[in-house]
Structure formats: C-alpha cells, structure tokens
Amino acid sequence: MAAATPQAPSPSTASSIPGFIRRLGAFDATMLVMGGIIGSGIFANPHEVALEVSTPALILGAWIVGGVVALLGALVYAELVARRPEVGGQYAYLREAFHPSVAFLYGWALLLVTQTGGMAAVAVIFARFFRSLTGVAWPEWTIALTALLLLTAINCLGVRAGSTVQSVLMVMKIGAVVALIACGLWWAPAAAPAPHVEGPTGLALLTAFGAALAPVLFAYGGWQTAGFVSGELKDPRRDMPRALLLGVGGVIVLYLAVNFVCLRVLGVAGLHQSSTPASDVMRAAFGPLGARWIEVGITISTLGFLSQGMLTAPRVYYAMARDGMFFKKVGELHSRSHVPVVATVVQGVMAMVIAGWGRYSQILASSRCGRAQRRGAGLPGPRPSMDNGFVCSFVSAVRGQHPVRETGRSRDRPVDCGRRVAGVRLLALARPLA
C-alpha cells in the first residue's frame, strides 16, 4: 500500500509559519487601522470638497457617505480576517480567492509603486515641515532618509517596538486633531452668516456630489493595511474585526468634527478659498502661533503615517517570499525579534532610494497611480483603484473555500457581515478611476 504523500502547509498562514509571536492586542490593531487612514490630508481635504459642493449640508453629507462606504468595507474585511487571519492580509486574500498571479502583481506593485512611492513622498513632506519648525539647514532628502532609517531600525527590533512607536504617534495625531476641533469650537470666532446661494440641481448636483466624494473616499482609505499583521495579533478573529469597526468609526467622528469646525470658522466661502483650512482655523483662534501649532500636528501625522507603513507593508513581502514569489531571504524571521527583518530593510531601503532620488514632484509623477502618497501628503486629485472592490468579492470565494465549523460559542464564529453588506461591492467599484 503506497504511503500517503504529505500535504504541504498552506503558505503564509499564521498557524503554519514558525517564529511569529502574537504580541499585539486590540488597542494596537485599532491604532494601526486609524494610522493607516489619517495622514495629513484631513488638514487640507475639506477645501477640496468645498470646491465641488457649495452648502454645509452637502459638504458634511459627502463625508458621511464616504464614512458609510468605509465602514461597509471594514465590515467585509472583518469577516475576511475572522475567516482567514493570515500574514499578508489583502495579498493573501487575492491569492486565495483568485490566483497567485493576481497576488503576485499586487505585492510587487505595492513594493515598487504604491507603498514605497507613498512613503518616500510623505517622508519629503515630513522633512519640509521639520525644517520649517526647527529651522535646521539640512537638505530635505537628508531629513527624509534619516526618518526612514530610524523607523526601519525600530521595526527591526520587533513588532512590539514598532507597534509601540506607531501607537504613541497615533495618540499624538489624534490629540492634534482633537485640539484643532476644540479650538474651532471654543476659541475661534464663528464666520458671519453667508447669503443663500443657489447650487446645482438634478444631474448637475449628482455630478458635483460624486466629484466631492472622490477626495472623501480617498481620505477614508488605508484601513485595510492593518490586516497585513493579522498573524501577529493575540486573538485576530476577535481583535481585528473590533479594531476595524472602532478604528474606522473613530475616524468618521474625527473627520466630521473637523469639517464642522472648518465650516463654523471659515464658512463655505472661506473654506472654498482656503487651501490650508486647518491652519486658518488655528490662526483665527490664536493667530500665527496657532498656525505654528498645526504644523506640529501635520509633522507628527506624517511621521505616524510612515511608521504605520513601515510596520505593516513588509509582512506582505514576507508572505510573498514564503510563497516563492520573492527572494528567499525576505521570507525569513530574525531569531531574536521574530519579525521579517530583511523584508523591513527592503522596504526601508527602497523608500530611501526614491526619497533621495528626486524632488517631491518627481516622486509623485513616478508613483502617481498609487494612493498612499496622496492620502498621506494630503494632495488633491486622488487616484483610487478597484482593489477594495475586488476585496469585497473575496467573501463569497473565501466562504466557499473555507467554511467555518460552528462550535456553539459566538466568539468562535466569524463576523458574518459580508452577505449583509454585499452592496458595498458596487459602491467600491463605483469609485472614480483616473
């Protein structure tokens, strides 16, 4: 009787990869979710929305609709993570639901274009604000490379070290946004009531509202990157769904509050004219000193955005290497820190090369199809892609391939939310492409 052929373990699953240590909890995951969303864009994007629609109801309505879309997407991801808590997140879902070649293209695009170009561009933005605040005469590329090198080194020390730095920066970032909201509510004078202006109606209104949704949907993007570290959560089936819902929900509250205070202090006309609404709100409250404070907030925000990317993205390259789609060394864990050090170094070096290679405009031109650099830097003209729409279609495929055994305890069952929000697929695929 022939011996049975041993079955190879499923690639890049947390349960079959030796060495990963589950050190992250629900708070860490929530900070990662929020850190992937909030860059410096919220300090400028209200202006972009006001360029398209001309009433407070429509401006706030666009941010509400965008938040609902993000929340529906988070619900879909919550079920995916509960069913397949894998290292690599979206890469692993693409591989399982469609084909390894699709995951291969996603992973390499992440490294060569979207993630790396985004981090390089945001590092240059950080360098600009750092120079403005400190008055140092160092070249921008020197500051950008130093920041990237420091974050690379921290994340090579272990997932706990990287997550702690990320959580601290995220708490400071939330503090900066809350300070902006408080100053706009209690210290800045309210704008004079503006005369009623007739806006577009019918199809023109729908077109304008759709255009306003583009920067809004873009500003809400990034929550899915937290799923890259699912294999290092203590209880991913419980903590990551909670983190997705709490993180996205918290960002919705913050974004709506920021837009409310911008409208209160600047009015629709002022918001339409101001390309730096957050600075103008703080200037109205405390003069030039207030504008200086918001620069500190933007500097922290950009550094936090870099920290989140340096922690999460290397897990995708690690998973690719475990699947034989990247260099073998990238798929190894350090014996002491139990993190993919080589993958982290690859990400850091690639970002440093691009950051030191050219001017900010050149970096954006070379990676203009990516989203991260624009979300982190707060630039107009988003370039949303269809990847989240594809992810929404993972649920049916993953349900069929990986049915979950019912145990009689609710905590052992995945978050069965994908079916309830199937319409998010159409919403996500309807996001404008450029």
Image: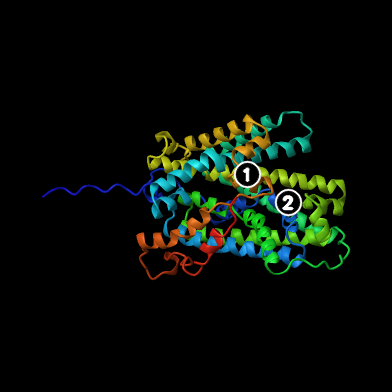
Which residue matches tag 1? Answer: 373
Residue 319 located left or right of residue 74? left
Mark whose residue sits in front, 1 or 2: 1
Image location (x, y in percent) of residue 299: 71, 43
Of residues 137 and 151, the one nearer the viewer is: 137
Q: Counting other residues with Cα less than 10 Å from the Cα at mark 2, is it few (<14), some (14-19), or many (20 or more)? A: many
Image location (x, y in percent) of residue 283: 85, 50
Of residues 361 and 290, the one nearer the viewer is: 361
Residue 352: which quarter of the image? top right
Q: In what element is the residue under mark 1?
A: helix
Which residue matches tag 2? Answer: 43
Of residues 103 and 257, the one nearer the viewer is: 103
The Cα atoms of the two marked residues, 1 and 2, are separated by: 15 Å
Residue shown at 70%/32% (left/top)?
A: 140
Q: Counting other residues with Cα less than 10 Å from the Cα at mark 1, is it few (<14), some (14-19), or many (20 or more)? A: many
Q: Which mark is residue 102?
A: none
Q: What's the image's color scheme?
A: rainbow
Of residues 225 and 156, the one nearer the viewer is: 225
Compared to 190, does 104 lie above or below?
above
Compared to 40, does 155 lie above or below?
above
Residue 47 seen in the figure: yes
Residue shown at 39%/63% (left/top)?
A: 399
